[in-house]
Image (cartoon, rainbow, N blue to C red):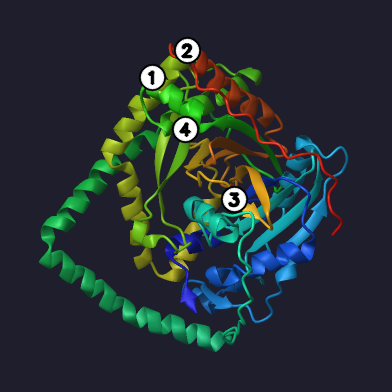
Amino acid sequence: MQSLSPQDASFLHIEDAVAHMHIGSVGIFEGPVPDHPTVTAAIEGKLPLVPRYRQKVRFVPLSLGRPVWVDDPHFVLEYHVRRTALPAPGGDAELRNLVGRLMSQRLDRSRPLWELWIAEGLDEGRWAMVSKIHHSMVDGVSATDLMTVLLDREDDPAEVAPVPWRPEPDPNPAQLVADALATRLASPYEGMRSVRAAIVRPGRVAGQLVDVARGMQSFQSLTRTGKSVTSLNGPIGPHRRWVWARGTLADVKTIRQQHGGTVNDVVLAVITRGFRDLLLGRGEELEDRVVRTLVPVSVRAEADRGSYDNRVSAMFAELPVGLDDPLERLQAVHTQMQGLKESGQAVAAERLTALSGFAPAMLLDLGTRAAGRVQQRNVQTVTTNVPGPQFPLYLSGRRMLEYFPFVPLANSVRIGVAIVSYDGTLNFGITGDYEYAPDVQVLADGIEAGIGELLAATTKPPARRASRPRAARAAPASS
């Protein structure tokens, strides 16, 4: 039995009937699709490497402690690894519609909080794997790490014999309360240890306080809504649209090398072009306007690799959608991101998140629930960029050709963008509210156009665009 961290628990507390806090991904594989027993056997062989996949969440009565992870004594792998088929003609549009529908369904909290869907019937002999996993279990970086664990690096890996698993007994409510009270009794000792550390190492603590104070100054811009575009905020429903945009790391690096900045600067600049097209298509006036975005920042240390819980902070950037020139947009993003990094905004956010560990669990529960219901208009979107493996991955001997991410929506944010790199590609997954963001394809098209216009602005010949790998046409094998 292990308590969730305050940050992990917050993703459970803010979830409601319309904000489903699972992240996800879509892998497109070469064919033919393996039969279902082969897929489940491949996943079963990896379960000992990811104990959390056989654990569920239990809530402590009266919120006397944070929720805890416990073994699920009734774990059934076939419940979590599911199979479906795309309707004809089985193209990209049908796959995107399926993903939007699957991601609109909340995970069952009485079971381990994940699902894998094998979708057969994709054209050109391909098939897809759709992953859903609750944000309380992983952040974006650890979710990508987890994918490299569940999949193989070779097309013919050695067989792994199943390892017998014996779950720990499911604790009863009295045991949950007793454990929570014991943890609370230990908290004063932890607090005194922190005070003692401050006395022994006052310079280090003072430095951290200075970092927080400097970072907090940069948060002042969040209180100003005048420059931000507010039509991207508002009520959301429970249903989702999901589309994608494609790019390559070679193209983005060519742009970066020619015009300066970082890969992330280029990514944010082309997303800015996408939002500009979206808002112009809605007939909005964009002069001197911005789209304010939350940019998650991983604070995962190398020592944290192998741990899949959340290690994330955030910065808040302003996408300059009012600028028409692509190079001016890129320079504006680069200058701003440099300033945010120097301000220590992410450090301040991480320190403040850590402080929530001192809050009584009941207050943490009530506080995050209340915050999740406030209709904020200071942040319009989220843009999360996660580096993925730069080598091919396989499932049951089939190569994963493409990999796209999914980001959830919450708290009046109607559109979110996730970016992941994989084997030379750089792919964007765009989530939109089904009712209030029916035009998210305009954003996707604008991102691809943004890459193209920055490439066209280079004086050096652009790197040759890598074509999307295709599988040979083959009829799917029967399952």
Mark 2 — residue?
A: 457
Amino acid found under the numbered disc labelled 4: Arg
- Residue neighbourhood size for the residue with mark 1, other residues' Cα within 10 Å, grouped as few (<14), some (14–19), many (≥20): some
Q: Position of residue 425 (x, y in %)?
A: 56, 36
Quadrant housing the C terminus: bottom right
Which secondary structure lies at badge 2? loop
In the shown orientation, is residue 188 left or right of residue 262? left
Amino acid found under the numbered disc labelled 1: His
Q: Residue at x 63, y 53 (%)?
A: 394
Mark 1 — residue?
A: 259
Q: Residue at x 33, y 60 (%)?
A: 355
* Real-space CA distance between mark 2 and mark 3, rounded to the nearest whole angstrom: 34 Å
Mark 3 — residue?
A: 393
Task: Please name which of the two marks, 4 or 2, marks the residue nearer to the observer.
Answer: 2
Amino acid found under the numbered disc labelled 2: Ala
Sequence-wise, the earlier of marks 2 and 3 is 3
Q: Position of residue 46 (x, y in %)?
A: 59, 67
* Real-space CA distance between mark 4 and mark 3, rounded to the nearest whole angstrom: 35 Å
Q: Quadrant of residue 116?
A: bottom right
Q: Which mark identifies residue 411?
A: none
Task: Please name which of the two marks, 1 or 3, marks the residue nearer to the observer.
Answer: 3
Q: Nearer the viewer, residue 430 or 391?
A: 391
Amino acid found under the numbered disc labelled 3: Leu
Q: Nearer the viewer, residue 339 or 453?
A: 453
Mark 4 — residue?
A: 292
For the residues labelled 4 and 2, say whether their Cβ atoms are less than 8 Å apart: no
Give the total number of marks visible in the rendering.
4
Q: Nearer the viewer, residue 338 or 361?
A: 338
Q: Position of residue 310 (x, y in %)?
A: 45, 58
Sequence-wise, the earlier of marks 4 and 1 is 1
In the displayed structure, 184 sits above or below 423; it is below
